[in-house]
Amino acid sequence: MGFLTAGLLLLVSAAAIISYWGAVRATNDAYDRSLLDPAVQLASNVFVSGHGARLDMSAKALEALVYDQTDEIVFQIRAPDGRIIAGTDGLNPVSDIAPGKHEFRDGTYRDRPVRIAALRNAGGLVVQVGETLNKRHRLVWEIVASELVPTVLIAIVSMLATWAGVTHGLEPLQRVRTQLLARRAQDLTPVADADAPEELLPLVDAFNALLARMREVAASQQRFVANAAHQLRTPLAGLQMHLELLLRREHQPEARDELERLHRAVVRAGHLTRQLLALARAAGDGPVTRQLQVVNIKDTAEEAAQRWVPQALHRGLDLGFALEPAPVMADPVLIGDLLDNLIDNALRYTPAGGSVTVRCGLSRGRPFVTVEDDGPGIPAGERRKVLERFYRLPGTTGEGSGLGLAIVNEVAERYQGTLELESGLQGQGIRVTAVFPAGAAAVLAPAAAPVDM
């Protein structure tokens, strides 16, 4: 549109210049002919006698000859020797006109621009008639306006019509753009081409072919991660069990230290394997509707409490639950992964003597689950980064893998939910909240009491 606007402005400017010069030429042609008539009449009324040349015309006739309602008309008659016979001395003498010829030229009279008609008769007498330019200017602008206004209107209508046409033609492309911007980074489903104009179909097809290849690569990577994690889980569990049995026996201090370090490494490897399996489930490229059912987060949290309360007590932490019904349409396994990772993260990074609280319920009709702790928290500038895979805060201690919140975010986005990270009460710790759509809320609505988050 910018190129079109610039082109139209250039065209209108060129039309204005051409119209102006054409109007000036047409105006001069029209008024020059009327300006030559008094010069001819003045020349025909000059008589030469023995006493010299003189103008033989009455005052009234002379006044009528040079009268004009709009402009001032002046004249000058010079003898062949350059002497002024009649008229004003404000016009410059003319010496380059051949006898019996006339010309039109621009000049000045008392510092005002004038148009002059000059002629020289056969006897060498020079007559000049000058006229100011008021009516010429007015006619020029009338001609320019009459020609330029339609041109400007045509240009404006053309711009509006082109803008409307281009906007209408690009609407399908804009819809495709909006769809792509609204997608998750892992969403590689084909772009709908039903509304795409025929000219864009090859581009959409090529883009969908690229997405298909990317889906194949992503699926291959996910299968590899899932298979590798699954194959590693059993031997790691066996190795952990044997190490725990070995640690129950008597050993030399050096050997026990080595066994304990080995046990911690195996535990961490087992945890990472479980995290990779959970990530593969959450980021799977299968249809979202697979294994969907109404899952009450309250029931899932109560099951999680049985697993995590003993660990919290072992670490000297207060793990509390404030649960209300919170139905969500989801895969129950993934909701369990989400809760386990939220609780595991909170327990890992909250120092002994701290507290962790798990809440769930409905907020404005939308199911939510929140895990809040009073640990070190996450700086505001790092809260989006911790949702990335394998990212850990600089200086973080502990045995985390950097996948916990990434898994939680994958699960939330998979079911059109949102993840919110905020500071805990009194600015201490971190509160992580997953909020889901209200689609399944009506199923348990009679038993679900709204909760203020």
Image: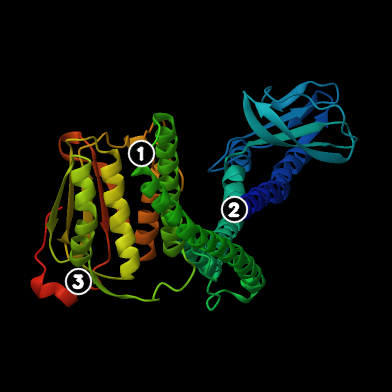
For marks 3 and 1, give the CA distance. Answer: 56 Å
Residue 210 point in image, percent of width and height = 64, 65
Identify which residue, 148 or 223, lies in the foreground: 223
**Residue 124 in view of the camera:** yes
For marks 3 and 2, give the CA distance. Answer: 53 Å
The quadrant the N terminus occupies is bottom right
Who comes first in sequence, dot 2 or dot 1? 2
Q: Determine the secondary structure under disc 3.
A: helix
* Residue annotated with mark 1: 250
- Horizontal side of 384 relative to 359 (left or right) equals right
Residue 224 point in image, percent of width and height = 57, 61
Identify which residue, 288 or 18, lies in the foreground: 288
Q: Determine the secondary structure under disc 1.
A: loop
For marks 2 and 1, give the CA distance. Answer: 89 Å
Q: Determine the secondary structure under disc 2.
A: helix
- Horizontal side of 12 relative to 183 (left or right) equals right
Q: As shown in the figure, which amino acid type bears the numbered disc 2?
A: Thr
Q: Give residue 441's mark.
A: 3
List the single residue furthest toward the bottom: 194
Q: Quadrant of residue 439?
A: bottom left
Residue at the spot 62% in from the left edge and 41% down from the top edge? 61
Q: As shown in the figure, which amino acid type bears the numbered disc 3?
A: Ala
Who comes first in sequence, dot 3 or dot 1? 1
Residue contact between numbered discs 3 and 2, judged by CB atoms under 8 Å: no
Identify which residue, 88 or 57, lies in the foreground: 88
